Image: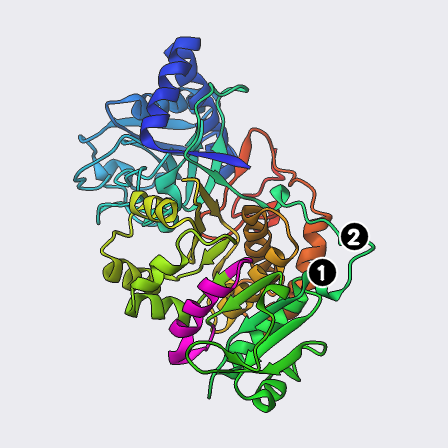
Amino acid sequence: MLPIYDVQQMREMDARLAAASSLDAVIDRAGYGIALLALKMLGAAYGKRVAVLAGKGNNGNDGRAAARVLGNWGAKAEVQDYPDVDTARLAGADLVIDAVFGFGFRGDFPGIGAPNGIPLLAVDVPSGLEATDGRACESTRAADVTLSLVGLKAGQLMGDGPGLMGETYLYRLVGDVPAVVPSGRLIEPEDIRISRRPVTSHKWSTGMAVLAGSAGMMGAAAFTAAAALAGGAGIVHLLAEDPAAANLAMAPLASGTVSVGARFDGSGWEPAPDLNRYKAIVIGPGRGKGAGAELAALAKGYAGPLVIDADTITAIAADPHLAGLIAGRAGATVLTPHGAELSRLAKALGMGTDHDSLTRWAVSGGFHLLVKGYPTRVYTPSGGFMAIPANGPALASAGTGDVLAGLLGARLAQGGATEAAISEAVVAHGLAAQLEGTEPATASRVLARVPEALEMLRAFQPRKWPAPFHPVGSRGPLYFPSQSSIDWSRR
């Protein structure tokens, strides 16, 4: 579990590092780390041409220190002071190191001038990317590899950040980072601790309900309910108006799910289920226009964990008073919007979609806000923030969000801590897709891999990467060194 810092926290950490040892020593260590990663990218140093574009601040000094080390190793390392960059002299370079601006950048930026086609190693962040919120200038050149110094920055993991960082590695600089309370946490597979059920458990120990599906949308209900079973729910009641349609939809995907017909009349269900018998409820996937009234009834009549997805999120955007009904529920509440749904919610509720606005909204509403996208971002009622870089491009397929909703419900039904359950579901979902390869996988294939992914996470061992670099993904999760563009086996 790696800490995530905002810019002010990084400034404080820099000050403490400088006070603990001389700033020159810190810069020298940074330069060595940059040079070592450059060496890994190049495969060898002797005779290689490396262009270092250096700014006026400490980021530039880190780049200059790297140039000295690479020169000692036999590379032809040339430093060009920004903005006086001679682009003609960059032609033919084997590697460009972007050390122009670091985490303190704000404002406009005309670009570094490095030609496309030459590998680019960014120091800390690609120049032109704001480390607080991930906003980037149009001229920002995407890095092939980024070396994040000391700690991770929030802007690397949101907004334009993930698309610009390339393969990203953390280099800690020192063994003991000065104590600064981080603003968030990066959740990785080795952080997940999935326990097995007690031997005394029975199906209702983890029983749950799924309120999903409507005419023409029973596939969403089927994927959600089947994923709940695959994720560990002992029994799943699919509350659908047409039990025949529910059974037909479920048959190919999950034997063992109980389909229960229950028509909602605007105030309750007929026949009325015992809602509080369920350890968790998922509402929304494919539910249609009645989702808002059902949510209002659940907010008043159900005290357990509640996952609000898809059509129910759309219902909140259409009727904002529903947001007030779910605020401060006794049980955990998890909202799961994707980008477009979040924008509609924000517009309806008069709030922003920036990092600070979402943090405040989760606190004021007393719920967990899970924002889909890469990486998955989770804002907590306590004001915390989690980034989970598990959902790579294999999940860019219709229906995979329904699988995640069912998984979330199942992990919440296990009765553990809410944030642990969310982390388990998101990482297992991403790993299941990874097992299907890098191309978009169908929801049914992802669903089929869920039990295997959960079992892998139970036995997951920390990844063996060459010290001192720790992979943090960026354009997709890096679970194993073989997924990297760098040949880590080279000495």
Front residue (pair 46, 134): 134
On screen, residue 480 above or below 281: above
On screen, residue 402 above or below 214: above
Q: Nearer the viewer, mark 2 or mark 1?
A: 1
The image position of residue 404, as x and y in percent, is 54, 63
Is residue 245 rendered magenta in the image?
no
**Drawn side of residue 100 relative to residue 280, left or right:** left
Magenta-highlighted stretch: main secondary structure?
helix
On screen, residue 466 above or below 386: above
**Drawn side of residue 481 relative to residue 14, left or right:** right
Circle 2 residue: 198
| Residue type, numbered disc 2 | Pro
Circles 2 and 1: CB atoms closer than 8 Å: yes
* Tag of residue 205: 1
The image position of residue 366, as x and y in percent, is 42, 48
| Residue type, numbered disc 1 | Ser
Is residue 303 rendered magenta in the image?
yes
**Drawn side of residue 128 relative to residue 281, left or right:** left
**Drawn side of residue 188 relative to residue 13, left or right:** right
Q: Which contiguous range is marked in magenta?
A: 285-306
